[in-house]
Amino acid sequence: MLAFSSCWNNSRHSDGEKMIEEIVDLGFSHIELSHGMTIAKLPGIQKAFKRGIFTCSGVHNYFPSPVEVMIDAPDAYEFTSHRPFDRQRAMDMTLRTLELAAEFHAGYLVLHMGSVPMNPKRWTHPLTAMVAAGEEHGSKFIKSKIAFVKKREKIAPLYYHRALEALTTIAERAAGLGIKLAVESRSRYEDMPTEREMLALQAHFADHPSVGYWHDFGHVQLKHNLGLLDHAEWLGLISPHLIGGHVHDVEWPSRDHRVPFSGTLDYAALLKFFPPGCPLVWELSPSREAAEIRSALIRWKNEFPERA
């Protein structure tokens, strides 16, 4: 199933119905309702849904945004936070999102699980800058990356436990609603879970049909570009747990959410790991032009007709 995320045009609209109509006009009838949505747009989205002009492939937490958060900030509240209020707010908003997902007959809910308290300006950003400068084989880069991994591994268990505890609660409600929980791969190594943690998490929920893995093509490619994993190898390992994925491209080394075919990703090599019919959602930056998207969609349908 090919779908499109509302993150592309959400910020340009005050009317949810008009937002949906613009996406449908691009050539997509399946839409993922994404984070960053104000509650004021909800009636218009509901109206478009009742008109039958789109089907909701899934929903991305939090939907709608917490009313007190004035910007698009899906990580405003984290399950891993040291603040009990934030953890509870994250839980309350997620359970509310599940209810709305059921209203739109969504098949899945994409989840961010949190992070460990390591500032990306100290870790991911300098590594990315070194890669951009062609220094990824130098001793400074290698030493920095090893120190990064060691520090994160040392402090991670508490935050992994908090994420696991939250997911256990959410999964019970999701099972009752018939919605799959799609735990998303993240773009930064500071985020929860890493690939090792993702495998452990999926093993923990092996007998729970509501929990699976959501592959973000761009996020994983950013880690690939830092030498933290091999993109295709990772997909081969995690593929038994795949629910679907966010499709976008990456301009070397770290500009993601680009239109497919405009960057470095080899889709043919990666799509083979995805089961037939699973949702593939184009999740594009608001800066991408409609004409570029339409052109890429034509090419996608020609090259991957079975994925259209």
Image: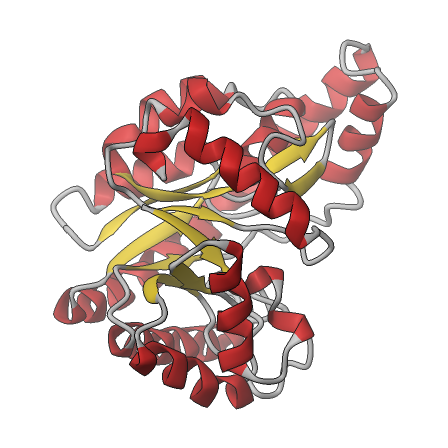
Left or right, residue 72 beside residue 138: left
* Residue depicted at 53% across the width and 44% down the height: 186
* Residue depicted at 51% across the width and 41% down the height: 297
Left or right, residue 208 beside residue 55: left
Describe the colour scheme in one phrase. secondary structure
Foreground: 206 or 149?
206
Left or right, residue 287 beside residue 40: right
Residue 73 visible in image:
yes
Foreground: 163 or 96?
96
- Residue 106: percent from left, percent from top: 28, 65
- Residue 73: percent from left, percent from top: 62, 68
Figure check: 175 above or below 17:
above
Foreground: 239 or 87?
239
Left or right, residue 265 beside residue 140: left
* Residue depicted at 38% across the width and 85% down the height: 47
- Residue 270: percent from left, percent from top: 43, 23
